[in-house]
Amino acid sequence: MSKEITVKTIEERPEGYEGEGYFLTRLDKIIGTARSHSLWPLPFATSCCGIEFMAASASNYDIARYGSERMSFSPRQADVLMVMGTIAKKMGPILKHVYEQMAEPRWVLSVGACACSGGIFDTYSVLQGIDRVIPVDVYVPGCPPRPEQILEGIMKIQDLARHESLGRRNGQGYQSLLDQYGIE
Amino acid sequence: MQDLTQLTEQQRELMQSKDEHYTLNLGPTHPATHGIFQNILKMDGERIMDAEQTVGYIHRAFEKLAEHRPFYQITPITDRLNYCSSPINNIGWHLTVEKLLGVETPKRVDYLRIIIMELARISDHLICNSILGVDTGAFSGFLYVFQYREKIYEIYEEICGARLTTNIGRIGGFERDLSPAAVQKIKNFILEWPKVWNEFESLFNRNRIFLDRIKGVGPISADRALAYGFTGPNLRAAGVDYDVRVAKPYSSYNDFEFKIPVGYDGDTLDRYLVRNAEIWESYKLIKNAFENLPEGPYHADVPEFYLPPKQEVYKNMEALIYHFKIVMAEIDVPKGEVYHSVEGGNGELGFYLISDGGRTPYRLHFRRPSFIYYQAYPEMIRGSYLSDAILTMSSMNVIAGELDA
Amino acid sequence: MTHPEIVEKLKNQFGSDILEAYENYDMLNIHVPAYKIYSFLEYLKTDAELNFHFLTDLTAVHNPFDEGAEFLMVYHLHNMPKNIRIRIKASIPASNPSIDSIHQLWPSANWQERETFDFFGVNFIGHPNLIRIMNVDEMDYFPLQKQYPLEDATRQDKNDAMFGR
């Protein structure tokens, strides 16, 4: 017989049936919860937003609370590609190269006005937004955004990770999205 | 099974061959390069024989952008040059325009500018030295000291509203006087800072591992440094006591007495120690300027560039016309060409401005110290190990925004 | 050394090659012909009394309406012990924008000349590696010349009329 247990948790718990010693829920909810709490970022910091990222990872705003303790600079081991700062046209192919090397599931967080849309630099040498070369999941506007905004961006990626269906990455919609960008 | 102790003739020849160089690509995305620049290294084992550099991965065309913007709209662009100490760039630009216009700022403005610029210099050197610690593996210094960068950010927020890219001040002074909260925060900073920096220095200055890693790494002699156009802490570490604040004082720096710390060998240890000593000198400057802050107006009388107070604009016809002309940038600027430089966090940051009387500059060129001294990097790392090359780059304080502009 | 003394000394050495010498905002400006720039700067650097041993800045200005002198090369030199700065100018025509490279005198001129080539198209004779430095290698025009716009000509999404251009 299952008892009513009220547990105070901060994050939402997956729905399920529980009893003494067991908890029954769907597999993708457990996987989603686990993934969302251990997102390893790849800090692709190019300019001023990179300094705000350093402030976000320092002790005052502490990105490690969200599971992003280990910054992975190798794309093979990273989950979230955090693009922070201006991407020039010279850098665009390199950004695409880094994105292609990441393993599924991968998310992209575009931090700062320059990464989202070119920012104040509407010039011949700046890529007007990284969504011209790679698909982006969450945009964080600001110039530079406060560390709290970067953390909210991470929280939105966490929401995406928590509620993603397991078959999404193999499905037709995602493949056609990648085909739009010319990514295999 | 092959006996691995018996090498074949071919294997023996290969091992004894002396020019077995291989190419290693360092960057542009690399955790230890602070910013995006690429170095293709030719290596012999762990030793670096030569380096070929590629920059321009964050070229944002500042100089072309400045030709299309009125003078006060160029200040946000100068923010993004050396973004670790943006108030220095902003105030340097305002000083350049004030030189062109022939405006003299009141003493209070000068002293406030000194306080803000020296806070920016402390925050820049703070990043450089703590990241040098992180690159050698000592992470705690960075965590503890970055808390004080947050305190400096709070002071900027009280003065201008922004943390990092400050757009601080106006042509002629400041848009508002120091609020009581700002005064209190600067006082707290002055009280708390010595203990914090003493703690950081006690972690590193006599730390055997840290000193062994950075002594004798990446040296450059004073002659080569001058030939390569070095300025700032990198040049002072090589032994030349050149500081723009002393050579061509601006913003009433000549009212204060401060020392210029100088090193001997120009290696990483000297650069680290020179930056440490400069932080102490900046702290003394802030304390002196704050204690002797004179009363008076917080801006010069430049009605063509300085927005009039809003109450005047609603009542006074003249103020209304000035407000309109300033915002629509229909101001007549005198023709002329001027070169002004300030002592930035990295060295001499120069602004070469040519005005043809129009609403935007005809030509604006930034003399960026990082761009000029980064050319010496291959010479400084030739013959050293890869890990030493990383530390040399770390200690040179190359900021990508300033490198590529 | 005062500014008149410097001009006097240079006139004694170079005579009619000094096209113009004037002062603005406390800085001495000297205009010389482009073919003389290397020997002129070498004299400024090596002379014991003048001793302008430090190259502060090297750049160019594009004046499309100055027929025959479209590109103006500007060099800022500095004598640190005596604390004197000087600005040297040299004009080159757009039909043949070439000038001697000074990287033998100062290694710091290397990248600055590459940047000037990248932005304006000025050809530096004798430069060891005159290729683009800031822009992408495939770029086929020199962007900081006045006739080219600031924005990227190929972008579609920003409506120029709405942005006031």
Image (tube, coloured by chain):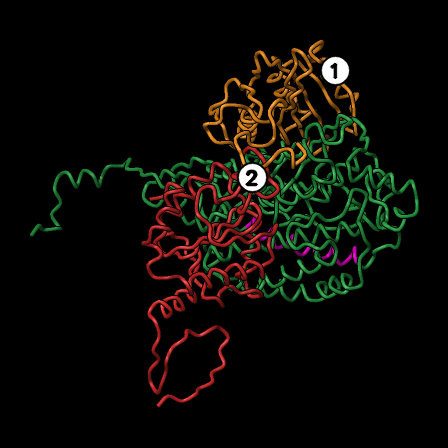
Chain colours: A red, B green, C orange
Please tell me whether residue B220 is drawn above or below residue C153 in the rendered image.
Answer: below
Residue that numbered label 2 is attached to: B403
Chain on which label 1 sits: C
Please tell me whether residue C163 is drawn above or below residue B111 in the rendered image.
Answer: above
Q: Nearer the viewer, residue B129 or B34?
A: B34
Q: Are marks 2 and 1 in contact (CB under 8 Å)?
A: no
Relative image position of residue B355 (x, y in whole percent): 74, 28
Q: Is residue B284 magenta?
A: yes
Q: Nearer the viewer, residue B78 or A9?
A: A9
Among all residues in the image, which is located at the extreme top? C16
Left or right of B137: which side holds C78?
right
Amino acid type at circle 2 is: Leu
Helix, strand or loop at mark 1: strand
Among all residues in the image, which is located at the extreme left? B1
Amino acid type at circle 1 is: Glu
Dominant secondary structure, magenta: helix
Looking at the rendering, the stretch of residues picked out in magenta corresponds to: B270-290
Q: Quadrant of the image for the C terminus of chain B?
A: top right
- Which circle marks residue C20 in the picture? 1
The residue at the point 63 percent across, 47 percent down is B345
Helix, strand or loop at mark 2: helix
Please tell me whether residue B297 is drawn above or below residue C31 in the rendered image.
Answer: below
Left or right of B400: which side holds B113?
right
Relative image position of residue B193 (x, y in whole percent): 67, 63
Chain on which label 2 sits: B
Is residue B398 visible to the viewer in this orientation of the structure? no
The picture quadrant where one finds residue B62 is top right
